[in-house]
Structures are given as structure tokens and as C-alpha cells.
């Protein structure tokens, strides 16, 4: 008797589901916005004049529990400057086959060069395209920015950049 009741309650679930309106996600035509704090693709930010915020210090790489970040720093020179101060990130890679989106790297970054966007569309059909290089990670140039290398704003020091005093 109890088996019969179990079967009837099981079919009850089936029948009640049959008359529910189906929920169909229309992705990618309709995209549901993520929460503002969603940890998506990383971004390497720039200062207001276009110089890069990354100083190649590797703190993000050391903080990463998944060993997903590879950084090689190099020296700026007066004729070829990519960031304020002595060093810049010459090579910067994030391996999205390893990244778990934990955000420890952005917490470790001393210049706020590294942040995370809400972009989650990073699927691909091969492994090498999921290792993002600087060309994919650097923030796009905004109006008023100049593509590095170029000199720091006249009369400023790297401290002025770090303290947010260079606004254009
Ligand atoms: S989000 Fe986490 S796993 Fe991904 S690169 Fe940053 S520290 Fe590594
Ligand atoms: S992103 Fe930040 S922590 Fe990583 S190398 Fe650049 S400055 Fe250092």
C-alpha cells in the first residue's frame, strides 16, 4: 500500500510539472546582468593620461592560490616609459584554465592596477586562447588618453600618480 502511495505522489510531481510554464533561458540573445561585485575577467587599468598602473611587482602572482598569473617586470626608461616610477609589467598573463575567480590577486595589487570586470564570456575551444595576455587584459584607451610609451605629465612624480593627482 505504501509503495502505491509513493508511486502516486511521484506521478503527482510529474503531472504538476507538466502544467507549469517552461522557463527557457534565451542566452546569448538575452543576457541577465550579473551582480555588480561579480568576479569576471580581469582588467589592467590605466591612469588618466594612458600610462599603465601595473608596476610589474608580481604581488598578484604570489597571492594567486591557483598559480594562474605570470608577470615579468622591466625597467622604464626616459625614452620608453609605460608606467610612472621605475618598473612596468612587460609581460602579463592570466591563465583562465586555472583561475577560480577568488579575487585574491586584486586584493594584493598595491596600485589598483588589477581589478575584475563583470565579463564572464570567456569560453573557447582551445587551451592557448584561454591564456590572456596584456593585449586582452589592458583597459581600452579612453578619450584624452595617449597610448604608452610616453613621458609622465609635466612637473609630476610617480607619487602624484599614485595619489590620484594626475587627472588628465
Ligand atoms: S582570481 Fe584568484 S585564481 Fe584567479 S588569478 Fe586572481 S588570485 Fe588567481
Ligand atoms: S597587477 Fe598589481 S600586483 Fe600585479 S604585478 Fe601589476 S602592480 Fe603588481
Image: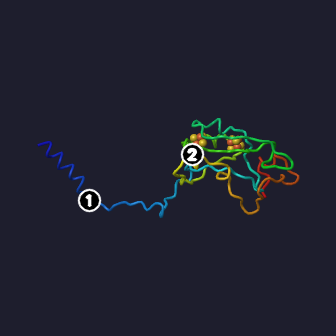
Residue 48 position, x and y percent, is 75, 56
User: Does residue 61 appear in this view?
Assistant: yes
Identify the residue shown where x is 65% and y is 48%. Answer: 133
Residue linked to disc 2: 96
- Which quadrant does ligand 2 occupy? top right
Quadrant into which the N terminus falls: top left
Mark with earlier residue (2, 1): 1
Element marked by disc 1: helix
Left or right: where does residue 150 sit relative to residue 39? right
| Residue depicted at x 48% and y 61% | 28
Q: Which mark is residue 69?
A: none
Examine the rendering and report whether any part of residue 110 can be seen.
no
Residue shown at the point (25%, 57%) measured from the top left: 16
Q: Quadrant of residue 159?
A: top right
For label 1, the crowd category at 10 Å Cα-Cα, with few meaning under 14, some 14 to 19 and many 20 or more, is few
Q: Is residue 49 left or right of residue 119?
A: right
Tell me if residue 108 comes above or below residue 33 in the rendering.
above
Determine whether, in the image, residue 53 is placed left or right of residue 65: right
Amino acid at each position: 500500500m505504501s509503495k502505491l502511495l509513493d508511486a502516486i505522489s511521484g506521478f503527482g510531481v510529474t503531472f504538476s510539472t507538466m502544467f507549469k510554464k517552461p522557463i527557457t533561458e534565451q542566452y546569448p540573445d538575452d543576457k541577465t546582468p550579473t551582480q555588480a561585485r561579480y568576479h569576471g575577467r580581469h582588467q589592467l587599468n590605466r591612469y588618466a593620461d594612458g600610462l599603465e598602473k601595473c608596476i610589474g611587482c608580481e604581488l598578484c602572482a604570489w597571492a594567486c592560490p591557483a598559480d594562474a598569473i605570470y608577470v615579468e617586470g622591466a625597467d622604464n626608461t626616459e625614452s620608453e616609459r609605460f608606467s610612472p616610477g621605475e618598473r612596468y609589467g612587460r609581460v602579463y598573463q592570466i591563465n583562465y584554465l586555472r583561475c577560480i575567480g577568488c579575487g585574491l590577486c586584486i586584493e594584493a595589487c598595491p596600485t589598483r592596477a588589477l581589478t575584475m570586470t563583470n565579463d564572464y564570456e570567456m569560453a573557447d575551444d582551445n587551451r592557448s586562447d584561454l591564456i590572456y595576455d596584456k593585449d586582452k587584459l589592458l583597459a581600452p584607451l579612453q578619450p584624452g588618453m595617449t597610448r604608452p610609451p610616453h613621458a609622465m605629465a609635466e612637473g609630476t612624480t610617480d607619487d602624484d600618480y599614485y595619489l590620484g593627482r594626475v587627472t588628465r
